[in-house]
Amino acid sequence: MLATCTTTLQSLSIASAPISTAPAPISTAPAPILTAPAPISTGITQSINANSSTSIPYHLVNNSQSTDDEGLNFDKETSSAGLPLPRSSPNPREHGGFFIESFSGAAAVVLAGRTALDEFNDDRFAEQRKTNLYYPFTSRKEWQLANWLLTSSLTMAEMDGFFKLEAATKNNPLSFRSAKELKARMDFLPPVARWKSKKMVVDPAYPTKKPLYLFYRDAIEVLQDIFKSPLVQDSLAFTPLRIFETAAKLNRVYDSWLSGERAWRLQAELPAGRTLIGTILSSDKTTISVMTGNRCAHPLLISIANIEHEHLSKASHHLLQLLALLPIPVYRHKSQEVRGVLENRLFHRCLDVVLRPLKLAAAIGVLMADPVGQVRICHTPCAAWILDTPEATLVSCVGGGGKTSPFTTAIYKDYGDPDSTGASLRRVEPTALLIRAGGTGLRASSDPSEFLQPEILHHWHKFFFDHDLKWCINVVGAEEIDFRYSPVQKRQGFRIFPEGISRLKQVTGRDQREIQRYIVAVITGATSNRFLLAIRALCDFRCAGQAPRFSDTTAFRVQRALNEFHEVKDEVLKLGARLNSKDDLWIIGRFRNSSVLPSIKSSGPIIQWDANKTERAHITLVKLPARSGNGREYEVQICWELDLHSRMRQFDLMTSMNDANVDFRTINDDNDLDEEASVPPKPMASPATVSTTSELQQRVLPVSEKLWGSTRPKKDFFSLAADLRNNPNAPKPLRALLANKGHTAFHLIREPDLKTHSVHDAQALFQLPDFPAALFDYLARAKSGTSTFTIAGRRMVHGVATQFPFTLKTWSKVNIQGKQYHNLLRPNDTRTVFATSPDAGSDWKFGRTDCVLINTDDQKVWPQSSLEGSHILCALKDSIF
């Protein structure tokens, strides 16, 4: 970045980067969103469990500020308008077994507002919908057809052809006869956040090839649409938390942005009763043309950090919204450096326009209603900005072409082993004075290191493919490493690389993860132990860093793995794995992992800020809408398509709730009045009031299955095994079994997919020479009541010639499911283990025998026990019962 960076840029980076000696502001607009105090997320004023305690930070008490009950009268039963005030609901997030300390006096409800359903029922077409709920359509069937047509990939001409089909319209006459007429009906649907455009004026001395237009929406309106949706109620939280493993408060737990140190600190800066809506932003250029055209877009996405990560990351929930399409200028100036400065200036001018509502709301607050109509005074600080390294340097105004750190004052020549604290302070202080950071009046929440989080996709997985993998190829050899990858056995749910990996060029993030799964085992024996240790340490670092929940102990393990790499990284240079390295320096722009541990403690797990969901959003929010038009003015086409689909989703949800006779708001028992027996019953039953998304789903799902995306539930073999065990009429043997003290479940299909065999026939078919003896030994020990069984070794010889009085049912595969490592209350994904006999006519002519790791120690529970205790590695030859 040149010496003419703007005040806006400084407000983003504070004293983090020496931008220039004399910054020349190009705009006097308010500094971007990040300058305001950022209270952390939201909550609910009540404690999460009975053992938790609340505490009020010292300065909130000592400076005579009022608590919620005193200053704002939050304990009143009615608002100034005479409406009953809903009470704060318990925090929906599960923290079973932990000691919870919630921030007292945060996220108070100030009045009762209107829900999304209230606004729908009172809009300009409310009278028409009293007689026809689906106005401007004649019925639900017609609306379903219109919805299907507009969400399909059909062109306008193809839809017109459909309307001309006699079979499609004869028995079901439609109120619209063309695609143009159908799309005109969309203007009657409930409005959403409106798109705006602004022409960006450029300096006449630096003209562009075409006019520049900024397309954007009001950020507060977009956040309100997300915040008010009934579909997020169960995943919303409002109050900063301190979570501890025990009441001694020695080991803190971090599982969300709300549980981090920054959230608590930012909430303490606000007046009592205020609510903070953590804002997630993401920006990156993306290509929208197919094969040719070289057309790009620069989307700015927005979401809310108060929503649980697992819910937020699902694309079918549409919680990541497009806030703006930033212009991509093409300047006519000959100098590439000047063009770069002008482009960066324009980028921050656009941010000034788009983020101004967020900056004002972060500074003074704004009234916002939650899904059940509770209105709070909300502040909107930036919780995180998800971006890759070049975009991060652009946002933090440090330039350097991706080589300069966006988090610190370090340039690429400073990378390597860290200096002492004193040396760092002596270097930072003159830099801060140089750019007059002390006179900007900016808060610590403007520091890029606070909201620019480590990013898994680009900083870890792509780093592995660009560096770690290249080191391994240089040391082991391309042909050798390809050969070592080629015989890896196929497993369901995992990719293999039969042609090797040395020639791979453009790969996805999933491919990068799959290569990492095998890399340590593949290079074992082909390189030195210290080099292997370096690669394994980085893999351990990335694996441990993706956990959805951390404690102080597990977070330190991540840092310890990184420290282990630094202790042996000299071996990488010694073996010549890093080519073209100068002076043995580790000058790698993305190799800045020292901020991972501070980020976990400050803002929660790194997995929250993974760019996979934003990359997916680029497809659904930018690329597909752009390709649905005529190829001209793609920005307008994107805005139109997104507005259309948002209206349709809102209309479908609201009409489905009315059709199911459901009202979504807090349930206030105090309002229940005894009605006299003489009062005649109402002709229509009153709507059933629900206040949770799960209850809403149960009632609305029969009406509309599309609201929740895929309705196929995740398999839970633990519940199935418990149901079968408690059912005396369940067929034997049971097809679902529990082991490992209830932490592992096995499941078989109902009917065996292989033939029934005698014991000796199975011995010959599956090539198990000691199977009869092992089975006889097992039955004998079980009959005698012993609890000790042999795994291998010497068997009783009687079993070899014994004629067993039963046959064996055989399966070719078994499903195994465990519990999540970080949450034993939730089942993990299922894994299918195959075991088939040799078949010369199939792809598995030698049989398929997947390997499994079995824990034989009753005192250890997988996965918490890791590899401690007694384990055996065996090849599953067959599944026999």
Image (cartoon, helix red, strand yellow):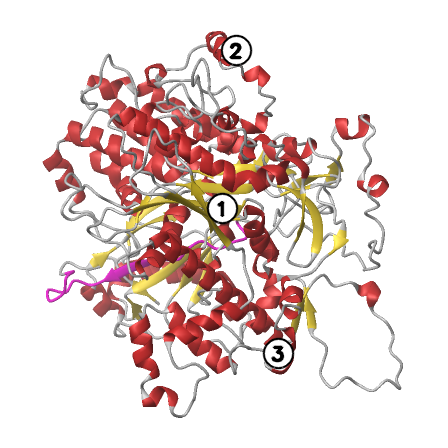
Q: Is residue 828 magenta?
A: yes
In the rendered structure, find residue 761 and report the number of the disc placed on it.
Answer: none
Q: Is residue 571 above or below residue 818?
A: above
In the rendered structure, find residue 128 and report the number of the disc placed on it.
Answer: 3
- Tell me which amino acid carries mark 3: Gln
Answer few, some or many: residues within 10 Å of disc 2's Cα (few below 14, many 20 plus, some between 14 and 19): some
Q: CA distance from mark 2 to mark 3?
A: 65 Å
Q: Is residue 151 magenta?
A: no
Of callouts 1 and 3, the N-terminal one: 3
Residue indicated by mark 1: 302
Relative to 259, is 208 on the left or the right?
A: left
Residue indicated by mark 2: 433
- Tell me which amino acid carries mark 2: Leu
* Camera-nearest residue between 225 and 478: 225
Q: Mark 1 or 3, which is nearer the eye?
A: 3
Label 2 SS: helix
| Residue 330 x %, y % | 29, 37
Q: CA distance from mark 2 to mark 1?
A: 34 Å
Relative to 669, is 836 on the left or the right?
A: left
Magenta segment boundaries in residue numbering: 824-844
Q: Is residue 341 above or below residue 656?
A: above
| Residue 127 x %, y % | 65, 77
Image quadrant in which you'd find residue 475: top left
Of callouts 2 and 3, the N-terminal one: 3
- Tell me which amino acid carries mark 1: Ile
Q: Mark 2 or 3, which is nearer the eye?
A: 3
Q: Is residue 714 visible?
A: no
Relative to 606, is 248 on the left or the right?
A: right
